[in-house]
Image: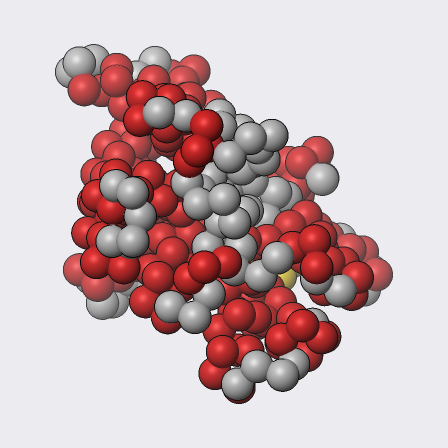
Amino acid sequence: AVSTTGLVTIDPGTTYNWIGEFIVMILFQLGGLGYMTASSFVILAANKKLKDQRLSILKSAFSLPKTIGVTHFVRNLFVFTIVSEAIGAILLYPHLKSAENPAWSSIFHSVSAFCTAGFSLFPTSFEGFRDNISVNLILAVLSYFGGIGFIVFTDIWSKIRNPIRQLTFTTKIILFVTLGISLVGTLAIFTLEPSIQKEPLGNRLLFAFFQTIPPPTTVGFNTLPISLLSLPVIMVIDFLMFFGASPAGTGGGLKSTTLSALVAEIWSHLRGYDKTSLVGHEIPGHRVRAASMSA
């Protein structure tokens, strides 16, 4: 739960009582946000300042652009998390009335989706809801919100408030890589998975789209039985899982910015460039070194 892997040896929904499920939820909530972020928020809530060392670690961990302050970021991150999870739970509630406790189930799965934890109270995850477009889209949005990271939404909000201001290069890279990986994954599953070929076109696209969400966000939910997927699709999912989510996001993996920095380094080296650049933007040496160490 703390590492938000979503792996289980038992079925949480039938094994644990409400208290046990609540403890699991708190653990993957803390794991999704990160212990440094959670502890920093507690310090800030007590009206205390963060020490320079903690500020430096947080800024490095989140790969924050110079335009975003750490203290402001941590406070807004918590607000954004709680609001997103609350809205997600409210939207899920009408569709989970078949659950034993629909209100609790909605809250649990909303937090699990946003934190990209993948824990479900249903024995077969969301296979029973694979035709439900609303549930699929709500979980997809929550997962992408958590996986993409708060840096992007902070940047977009600043852009809305000040239209003249340009989006940061970090935001553009995160959105581009996430969109690209999602499109490639959806197309691959849509084309290669034999078990969905006889489904209506709309359902087939929905199944492929939703099953593409877990790898780049590391959310772990599924609407198709993973053990029955074809080998080519399993390989595609493995490939997407390796790259994972984005900085300041709740997901794991190599991170989209790390992937882009490594690709830029290889491309620049092959072209004989002295400096690493990506689509006309120079990537600082310390970013490239950090990406290489992460890989």
Q: Give the residue furthest to the bottom.
A: 201
Q: Residue at x 43, y 70 (%)?
A: 131
Q: Nearer the viewer, residue 199 or 92?
A: 199
Return the x and y of residue 224 as percentages of the image width and height: 58, 61
Placement of 37 over or under 139, stated as above or below: above
Return the x and y of residue 222 as percentages of the image width and height: 53, 55
Q: Residue at x 43, y 15 (%)?
A: 53
Return the x and y of residue 142 as percentages of the image width and height: 36, 53
Placement of 7 over or under 177, stated as above or below: above
Q: Specify how the rendered protein is coloured.
A: secondary structure
Locate residue 30 relative to residue 82 in the image: left or right. Answer: right
Q: Nearer the viewer, residue 130 or 28?
A: 130
Q: Is residue 210 visible?
A: yes
Q: Residue at x 35, y 61 (%)?
A: 135
Quarter of the view holding residue 285? top right
Return the x and y of residue 67 as percentages of the image width and height: 34, 44
Could you tell me which quadrant the C terminus lies in?
top right
Locate residue 3 relative to residue 290 in the image: left or right. Answer: left
Placement of 259 over or under 28, stated as above or below: below
Q: Nearer the viewer, residue 251 or 164?
A: 251
Q: Nearer the viewer, residue 98 or 6?
A: 98
